[in-house]
Amino acid sequence: MILQLKKSTPEETINRLKKDHFARIVTKQDHIQAVTTKSTECVPEYVENYLIKSWHFDTDIQLASKSFEEKRVTSIGTVEIGNPNTMNFIAGPCSVESEEQIFTVAHSLVKLGIRSLRAGCYKPRTSPYSFMGMGKDGLKLLDQVRKETNLNIVTEVRDATHVDDVLDVADVVQIGAKSMYDHGILNACGTTDKTVMIKRGFGTTLKEFVQAAEFVLSAGNSNVILCERGIRTFETETRFTLDLCGVAFLKENCNLPIVVDPSHALGFRYGISDLSKAATAMGVDGLLIEAHPEPDKALSDSAQQIDLQQLSKLHSEINQLGLAVKLKLI
Ligand code: PEP
Ligand code: MN
């Protein structure tokens, strides 16, 4: 159940709600929002004088649900995401590796008219011996890129200790597939207004995926994007399996913008174009594509990154397909 209450609701009423299992109560701009999963059909009578509106749910998909709000439109820096007439094309290398590398990519994006650069500085890797990202030095480079090119910056947090550093630089904070259950990160991202993009864990059910978003939404941040990036199945020929059924479910049931990341799903560069076209035809809100000036030399996710010529070709193909399905690429 979600309650929207007047800002004049007395503290003792709020405290009573807390005791009544309204676990998440936050003050929004013009109301107080209280959410509980406790299944109850009745609004507590002691809040009736302060009630603006209430919603009843029998699942945990509440603030993210279409019956709460049909569709949320949020932003990636200077561009909108979630607008039914546009699709966001977000691209960049898996990791920031050097000044030359990130500026080469950034200038290519600007040339193509791509507005949003995605690159990681804190990489949550499977092996402790892999490249973990440039950390703060990488963030400094992204800050420089943003100032010099006006590109919107999407970058990842690996743990709650550097959320504030990332927030200083990023237009969108990415929570990776391996971090999406981390409550430290989810709660820290819930107490800012910055857009947060949550990537689906590879063993995460759709319900758990949306529950992670509910953590951020119920902590007060309304700006959440979901990113499908492939789940683990019995198949081993591809890195993961892009769950387009899951995307259809999210489109049907959730109000959050949906981004599809074919790069991590497939794990190889050969089919990125096909998967991007399939997702575009479905009418998703955005694509996230990994691209690197010299993919074979990339320090992370080398096999799946496309080079900048391939990126240019892909962008032009998706632009055309986007127009055919009435989506303007931004
Ligand atoms: C990434 O986006 O580079 C990344 C590590 O992805 P994921 O969290 O989906 O594995
Ligand atoms: Mn990657």
Image: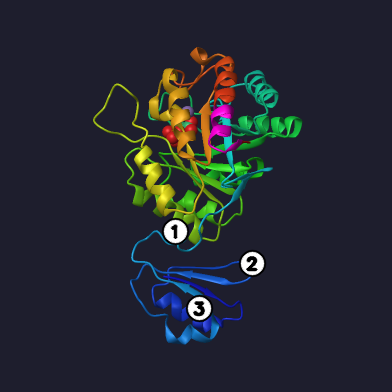
Query: Which percent across, then down, holds residue 109?
Result: 65, 25
Residue 117 visible? yes
Marked residue nearer the N-terminal end (3 or 1): 3
Q: Secondary structure at mark 1?
A: loop
Q: Residue at x 51, y 61 (%)?
A: 69
Residue 236: within the magenta? no
Residue 94 visible? no
Q: Are marks 1 and 2 in contact (CB under 8 Å)?
A: no
Question: 103 above or below 210?
Answer: above
The numbered mark at residue 18 is: none
Query: Which percent across, then down, holds residue 326?
Result: 57, 38
Question: 298 above or below 87?
Answer: above
Q: Residue at x 61, y 54 (%)?
A: 193
Q: Which residue is denoted by mark 1 in the rendering?
A: 65
Residue closest to the far right: 148
For residue 241, side relative to residue 306 (left or right): left
**The magenta segment:** 318-328
Q: Residue at x 35, y 71 (%)?
A: 38
Instruction: Please name the predominant secondary structure of the magenta segment in the image.
Output: helix
Question: 71 above or below 265?
Answer: below
Query: Which percent across, then down, holds residue 33?
Result: 52, 69
Query: Which percent across, then down, holds residue 27?
Result: 58, 69
Q: Quadrant of the N terminus?
A: bottom left
Mark 1 neighbour class, 10 Å CA radius: few under 14, some 14 to 19, many 20 or more: many
Q: Which residue is denoted by mark 2 in the rendering?
A: 29
Q: Nearer the viewer, residue 285 or 7?
A: 285
Mark 3 neighbour class, 10 Å CA radius: few under 14, some 14 to 19, many 20 or more: some
